[in-house]
């Protein structure tokens, strides 16, 4: 975010993730760096900038997409969870929704998350934190969410990944219903 000494830029002019929340993040970094010495400077990290579309149903994502993971040559496991299987979906009479995670089983971390469904713009916050803080899958698996809530989906999906398999799936396509992890054909 420094092009010249004592010149900073934030927001759309940077050409990086053109969202208000990205500009706010960049501004916080700039202010910090303006007020602190060179040895206390912070650098930007854009791995966990969430994206949201405020439609009906809402859509949100964070981190890598499956396409980008393939381009980078990463061997990630993709798994989906049908949000309609949650008790909260029954309480709210919701008949649509899916959470999808891209994880690296070797490192035990999340690289990407996407959600289509109720409160996706808020629910993506768990995925954002998981990526930003490099939370282990074990930590996510132990997440205690209120019951009934949409947040339960993360722990339930990660628990399904810890079940033993012969050949872990790599970047699979979405499948209908519930917990899905299938190997590519």
Image: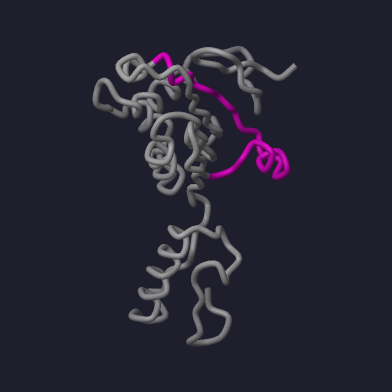
Q: Nearer the viewer, residue 42 or 34?
A: 34
Judged left or right of residue 19, residue 90 is left
**Residue 139 included in the magenta stretch of the image:** no
On the image, the x and y values in percent for residue 71 come to 73, 43
Question: Looking at the rendering, in which quadrant would you find the C terminus?
Answer: top right
* Residue at the image point whose x is 62% and y is 16% from the top: 182
What stretch of residues is rendered in magenta?
Answer: 63-85
Q: Nearer the viewer, residue 90 or 100?
A: 90
| Residue at the extreme front | 56
**Residue 68 quadrant:** top right
* Residue at the image point whose x is 61% and y is 12% from the top: 166
**Residue 175 quadrant:** top right
**Vertical position of residue 51 compared to residue 97: above or below:** below
**Residue 82 included in the magenta stretch of the image:** yes
**How many numbered tags mark residues here?**
0
* Residue at the image point whose x is 48% and y is 27% from the top: 99
| Residue at the extreme left | 146
On the image, the x and y values in percent for residue 140 come to 38, 31
Q: How is the image coloured?
A: one colour
* Residue at the image point whose x is 65% and y is 24% from the top: 172
């Amino acid at each position: 975010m420094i092009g010249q000494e004592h010149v900073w830029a934030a927001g759309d002019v940077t050409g990086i993730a053109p969202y208000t929340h990205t500009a706010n993040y960049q501004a916080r970094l700039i202010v910090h760096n303006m007020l602190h010495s060179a040895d206390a400077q912070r650098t930007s990290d854009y791995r966990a900038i969430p994206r949201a579309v405020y439609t009906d149903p809402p859509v949100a994502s964070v981190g890598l997409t499956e396409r980008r993971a393939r381009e980078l040559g990463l061997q990630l496991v993709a798994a989906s969870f049908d949000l309609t299987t949650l008790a909260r979906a029954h309480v709210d009479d919701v008949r649509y929704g899916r959470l999808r995670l891209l994880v690296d089983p070797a490192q035990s971390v999340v690289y990407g998350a996407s959600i289509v469904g109720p409160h996706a713009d808020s629910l993506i916050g768990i995925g954002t934190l998981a990526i930003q803080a490099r939370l282990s899958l074990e930590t996510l698996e132990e997440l205690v969410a209120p019951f009934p809530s949409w947040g339960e989906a993360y722990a339930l999906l990660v628990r399904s990944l810890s079940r033993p398999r012969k050949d872990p799936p790599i970047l699979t396509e979405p499948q209908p219903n519930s917990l899905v992890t299938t190997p590519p054909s």
